[in-house]
Image (tube, rainbow, N blue to C red):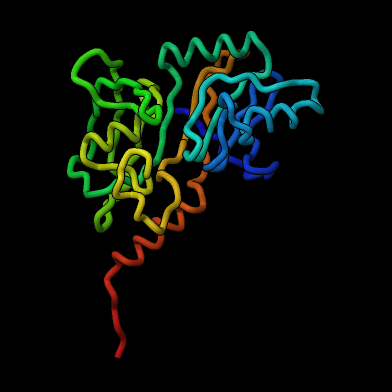
Amino acid sequence: MVKHKKSRRRHTGPFRIVHEDQDIVVVDKDAGLLTVPIPKSKARNLKELLDRYLMKRQGRAMQVHRIDRYTSGLVVFARHRQAREILIEQFRERTPNRLYLAIVRGVVEADKGTLRHQLKLTRDGFRQRVVERGGTEAVTHFHVRERLAGITLVEVRLETGLKNQIRVQFQAAGHPLMGDRHYEEAEKHERLLSRQALHAWRLSFLHPRTGRTVGFESPLAADLAWLLNRLREEAAPVTGTE
């Protein structure tokens, strides 16, 4: 069993360093921060902020994977080319264990299951679409952690890692992520949450130097924790005293 190291929540701006050594740096990022630069955008991003942070240590951050801008949680960067190549190969072979927490609309009836779709990236807002053929297979495993009135908290494990995969597949299954205005028109009216309810919770992989499995965990982001607590309070029975 992997022992996950929890985020120390040490602030260095809109991210926290969870783990740092000569080969890798694992970061817990806030929602709203890009993971890496995008063309023609001056928005700040995690890679550039990490480069500034590592400059004092004569290092830099090298991209291995990414999570969506408005998803919070864990990302790993390599600190040199060899480590990056080893980690990228692991992600290509789908060996890292990537667990997310998501709050989806509706009550998911099955306690656990697997979503399989063919996805194709379109030019319409760079959205993924579910297609019958000609797409790339997306596989997402889930199990229910909690059901509340009108929503479900699910733990999600990625088998593949396509852009917006979790968001698109749950929307296609009739359970869009709460707050996901990009893929669900009705979420534009959501007032309790300003982004999709998705958090990169746990991440484990083989360390590029030692070959041993290392695991990390990020506490649920504050806005999502607040939302769940509010929904639980609303769902709790009211008891009176005489």
Q: Is residue 107 left or right of residue 11?
A: left
Q: Residue at x 36, y 66 (%)?
A: 233
Q: How far across and how far down the image is residue 136, in percent?
A: 30, 16
Q: Residue at x 28, y 36 (%)?
A: 170
For the image, the number of numbered tags is 0
Image quadrant where residue 185 sits: top left
Q: How far across and how far down the image is residue 63, in percent?
A: 59, 20
Q: Is residue 40 left or right of residue 116?
A: right
Q: Residue at x 29, y 26 (%)?
A: 129
Query: Eyeballing the image, is 185 above or below 167?
Result: below
Q: Is residue 177 left or right of residue 10?
A: left
Quadrant into which the C terminus falls = bottom left
Image quadrant where residue 36 sits: top right
Q: Is residue 84 visible?
A: yes
Quadrant into which the N terminus falls = top left
Q: Is residue 58 left or right of residue 155?
A: right
Query: Eyeballing the image, is 49 above or below 192?
Result: above
Q: Is residue 18 visible?
A: no
> Residue placed farthest to the bottom in the image?
242
Q: How far across and how far down the image is residue 115, in percent?
A: 24, 28
Q: Nearer the viewer, residue 227 or 171?
A: 171
Q: Residue at x 39, y 62 (%)?
A: 230
